[in-house]
Amino acid sequence: MNLFRHRHRHRHRTVLGLPALVLLFATAGCSSADDSASTVVPSPGANATKLCRNLDKVLPSKVDGESRHDPEPASALTAGWGGPAIILRCGVTRPPKMIDPKVADGTDPDAVAGGVNGVDWLMEKRDGGGSRFTTANRGAYVEVTVPESADSSGALVDLAPAIKKAIPVGIAD
């Protein structure tokens, strides 16, 4: 059908339909972007990059029962599982909350320190739901974001063996 000719013949219908068409294209654009996870790749120093590459080699194929589906752009410093995705980023910078005295004394309502299977974590609530976990006391900071719908403890339990194997205890540079 020739849209231009149709518009001239039925002007009122086209004008009324145009906002719906624009809305349809906008919605389609949003939904296709939501189907594939994307994330910012960290840019750590040489030592952390080496540790992160080692971590990538030993990460599990499943986390919290979800299969691995890495985000774009592809990188040995990022990994993902499921949808909505559990995203791991290795070599991130130290989060400010990690040295916040309120977190250390347990008075921060949005962050708490703890450990799971021999890996220490800082847990932070994310705007919009879900949680962000960052390893502490390791040679590189590893961040794991977990959507509200996922079992964060299951994800951390599944990731702990790989982190312990690839990222030694120590101070991140």
Image (cartoon, helix red, strand yellow):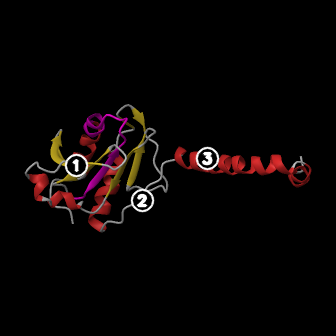
Q: CA distance from mark 1 to mark 2?
A: 23 Å
> Which mark is drawn over residue 110?
1
Q: Are marks 1 and 2 in contact (CB under 8 Å)?
A: no
Q: Secondary structure at mark 3?
A: helix
Earlier in the chain: of badge 2 and badge 3, it is 3
Magenta part of the protein: which range? 139-157
Percent position (x, y) of residue 49? 32, 62
At label 2, the amino acid type is Val
- Residue at image point 15% right, 53% down: 169
Local crowd size for mark 1, using a 10 Å CA cut-off: few (<14), some (14–19), many (≥20)? few
In the image, 111 versus 66, the foreground residue is: 111
Earlier in the chain: of badge 1 and badge 2, it is 2
Q: Secondary structure at mark 1?
A: loop
Q: CA distance from mark 1 to mark 3?
A: 33 Å
Q: Quadrant of residue 97?
A: bottom left
Percent position (x, y) of residue 111? 20, 49
Q: Secondary structure at mark 2?
A: loop
